[in-house]
């Protein structure tokens, strides 16, 4: 078994032993099993899911995954279980980021608002994918 911890600045969001975990690495989705080689990788907004069951996944923002043979620690800005994503909240974040991006002057401001918009868009898409009642 593989211990997985998902941690945000607000605290631990998930801690469990699983057979496998899939993470949204920058180079693409990465599947991790027990006895994986040591690795520190950057993650992007996307879905972390366990034992090939994406319905019980967790949407995560930017961060890092620290992988050892028996443990995966995901440190991320934000993490929300799929069933708890507040679609309206992330639509507001997306709209605000889009407005702020058009007014951004510095490279730092542009990068900050692009990241916020990308994370909000990803969370919106995940919510829509797992809630067939939600329309685009």
Image (cartoon, rainbow, N blue to C red):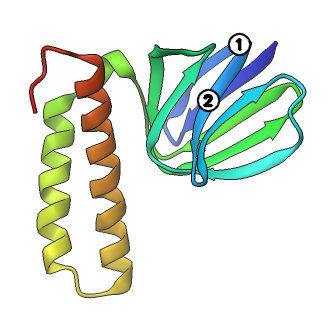
Residue marked by disc 2: 22
Residue 16 versus residue 35 in the image, above or below: above
Q: Where is residue 71 in the image (x, y as percent from the top left)?
A: 80, 28
| Image-quadrant location for residue 83 | top left
| Closer to us: 89 or 27 | 27
Dot 2, how many residues are within 10 Å of its Cα: few (below 14), some (14-19), or many (20+)? some
Rendered view: 120 above or below 101: above
Left or right: residue 50 versus residue 91 is right
Q: Nearer the viewer, residue 8 or 26?
A: 26
**Do the residues bearing badges 1 and 2 touch, measured as CB atoms within 8 Å?**
no
The correct choice, above or below, for 39 with respect to 101 in the image is above
Residue drawn where x is 31% and y is 87% of the image: 106
Query: Image quadrant of residue 114?
Result: bottom left
Q: In which quarter of the image is the N terminus?
A: top right
Image location of residue 97, percent across then percent down: 20, 60
Sort mark 1 into few (<14), some (14-19) or many (20+) by Cα contacts within 10 Å: some
Expressed as whole percent of the image width and height from the top left, the position of residue 112 reads: 35, 68
Q: Please name which of the two marks, 1 or 2, marks the residue nearer to the observer.
A: 2
> Which element type, helix, strand or loop, lies under badge 1?
strand
- Closer to the camera, 3 or 34? 34
Residue 64's spot in the image, x, y percent?
63, 49
Could you give the CA–CA distance between mark 1 and mark 2, rounded to whole angstroms?
11 Å
Q: Which secondary structure lies at badge 2?
A: strand
Q: Eyeballing the image, is 109 above or below 120?
A: below
Q: Residue at x 70, y 35 (%)?
A: 73
**Residue denoted by label 1:** 18
Q: In this view, does 123 lie to the left or right of 54?
A: left
Q: Please give the label number shown on residue 132.
A: none
**Which image quarter is the C terminus in?**
top left
Write the residue at 48% across / 47% down. Answer: 77
Position of 126 with respect to 62 (left or right) is left
Foreground residue among 72 and 78: 72
């Amino acid at each position: 078994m593989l211990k997985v911890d998902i941690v945000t600045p607000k605290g631990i969001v998930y801690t469990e032993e699983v057979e496998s975990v899939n993470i949204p690495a920058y180079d693409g989705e990465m599947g991790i099993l027990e006895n994986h080689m040591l690795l520190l990788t950057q993650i992007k907004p996307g879905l972390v899911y366990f034992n090939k069951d994406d319905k019980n996944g967790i949407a995560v923002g930017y961060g890092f995954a620290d992988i050892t043979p028996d443990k995966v620690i995901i440190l991320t800005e934000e993490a929300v279980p799929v069933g708890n994503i507040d679609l309206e909240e992330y639509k507001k974040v997306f709209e605000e980021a889009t407005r702020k991006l058009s007014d951004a002057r510095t490279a730092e401001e542009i990068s900050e608002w692009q990241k916020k918009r990308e994370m909000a868009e990803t969370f919106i898409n995940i919510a829509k994918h797992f809630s067939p009642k939600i329309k685009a």
